[in-house]
Image (cartoon, helix red, strand yellow):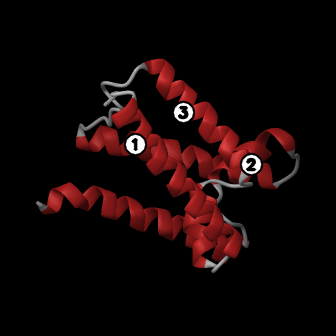
Amino acid sequence: MAFQEFAAPLAGGLLIGAAASGLLLFNGRVAGVSGMLRSLFTTRGGQSLERAVFLIGLVLGAWLYASLSGQVPVARAHFPSWLLMLAGVFTGLGTGVARGCTSGHGVCGLARFSVRSLVAVAVFLGVAMLTTYLVRHWWGIY
């Protein structure tokens, strides 16, 4: 495997870790993206601005990477659009049930040795593996 193949994911992981650590260290907040997004619509106050800036930074970071590298990621080139939208809906519902997403539970919760986050990540991964198996082997969608 060439260095270029894992350099971008490695850099991305380091940046996510640094951003999550910085947010916790300097603001005492966990970087749960789904919670931040939900709170923009449900809470009022001074923290809404910081959450909005954090979320905008996520989008601008992806845009900057695509602009500088010339590589625009393709979600799933051969997947039907309806299936991708359905996956997004189920992901949103799942983050609501779990009271957090992979960034909140997987990055921040596991780093804090949270048992609740460990259970949530195990469920996330189990459902992801089962879904991948069903979509590929039962329904034949690649």
Q: Residue at x 25, y 38 (%)?
A: 71
Residue 66: % across, % down: 32, 39
Marks 2 and 1, Cα distance to the nearest angstrom?
A: 23 Å
Crowding near pointer 1: few (<14 within 10 Å), some, many (20+)? few
- Residue 75 shows in this picture: no
Residue 87 vs residue 72, the one in the foreground = 87
Please tell me whether mark 1 or mark 3 is closer to you in this view: 1
Residue 4: % across, % down: 17, 57
Label 3: element kind: helix
Q: Quadrant of the C terminus?
A: top left
Marks 1 and 3, Cα distance to the nearest angstrom?
A: 14 Å
Residue under pointer 1: 133
Residue 39: % across, % down: 79, 47
Disc with the residue nearer the chain's start (2 vs 1): 2
- In the image, farthest residue toward the bottom: 113
Position of 108 with respect to 62 (left or right) is right
Residue 128 vs residue 91, the one in the foreground = 128
- In the image, farthest residue toward the right: 44
